[in-house]
Structures are given as structure tokens and as C-alpha cells.
């Protein structure tokens, strides 16, 4: 169950930068969404760390958020997609997978 909490925390970690990006135009609802996503992400990370080592949980949590924000940025906000960015995010993904495999 704690791995599910960690995955959901990572998904929420994607939500808050999206909310902040959309709140730039002054829409307070997106700002509130960002705060909600941050809070829920932190709570879920707390629950996940009950059995998952802190450094593993934190790295995977931030990795899911970083990769997710990267994908959303490309698809939704039309951020640039370059070979260097793809290679870099691939290293993040490999790190997440490596940490998960090493924790078994």
C-alpha cells in the first residue's frame, strides 16, 4: 500500500507546478489547486515513508513529479522538446526504476 501512496504522492507532485503555471494569469482557483496538490502530496509522502526508506521515497517522489511536469510541459504548454532534454529525463526515469528495484 505504501508504494501506492508514493505513486499517488508523485502524481500530486505534478499537480502543483501546473497549478502555479496556470495561476500566473491571476486565476486564484489554480493557485488553490496548487496548494491542495502540495498538501496532498506531502501527506501521501508521509504515509509512504512508514515502510519505504526516506531517501528512496523522496527521490522517487520528486522524480515522478519532475518527469510528469516535463511531459505536461511538452504536451500542454508546448515547452521545447530537444534531444538533450529527452536524454536528461531518461536518466531521471532510470534513476527512479533503479531505486525501486534496489529497494526490494
Image (tube, rainbow, N blue to C red):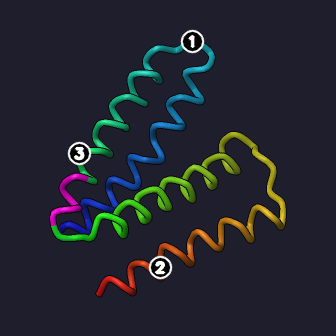
Q: Are marks 2 and 1 in contact (CB under 8 Å)?
A: no
**Residue position marked by numbered label 2 in the rendering:** 97
Sequence-wise, the earlier of marks 2 and 1 is 1
Q: Is residue 11 above or below residue 55?
A: above
In-front residue for pair 9/62? 62
Query: Which numbered mark, 2 or 1, is in the foreground of this view?
Result: 2
Separation of marks 3 and 1 at Cα, in angstroms:
27 Å
Locate residue 12 relative to residue 5 in the image: left or right. right
The residues colored magenta run: 46-50
Locate residue 28 relative to residue 56 in the image: left or right. right
Sequence-wise, the earlier of marks 3 and 1 is 1
Residue at 30% across, 36% down: 39
How many residues crowd mark 1 within 10 Å: few (<14), some (14–19), many (20+)? few
**Quarter of the figure with the N terminus:** bottom left
List x then y, in percent, for residue 61: 40, 59
**Residue position marked by numbered label 1 in the rendering:** 26
Quadrant housing residue 90: bottom right
**Residue 45 included in the magenta stretch of the image:** no
**Quarter of the figure with the C terminus:** bottom left
Mark 1 element type: loop
List x then y, in percent, for residue 58: 38, 60
In-front residue for pair 93/55? 55
List x then y, in percent, for residue 33: 40, 28
**Residue position marked by numbered label 3 in the rendering:** 43
Query: Which numbered mark, 3 or 1, is in the foreground of this view?
Result: 3
Separation of marks 3 and 2 at Cα, in angstroms:
23 Å
Mark 3 element type: helix
Locate residue 102 relative to residue 21 in the image: left or right. left
Amino acid at each position: 500500500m505504501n508504494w501506492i501512496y508514493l505513486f499517488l504522492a508523485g502524481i500530486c507532485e505534478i499537480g502543483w507546478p501546473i497549478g502555479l503555471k496556470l495561476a500566473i494569469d491571476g486565476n486564484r482557483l489554480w493557485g488553490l489547486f496548487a496548494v491542495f496538490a502540495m498538501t496532498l502530496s506531502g501527506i501521501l509522502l508521509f504515509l509512504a515513508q512508514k515502510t519505504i526508506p526516506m531517501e528512496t521515497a523522496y527521490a522517487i517522489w520528486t522524480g515522478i513529479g519532475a518527469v510528469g511536469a516535463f511531459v505536461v510541459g511538452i504536451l500542454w504548454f508546448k515547452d521545447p522538446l530537444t534531444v538533450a532534454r529527452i536524454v536528461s529525463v531518461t536518466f531521471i526515469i532510470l534513476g527512479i526504476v533503479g531505486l525501486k528495484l534496489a529497494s526490494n
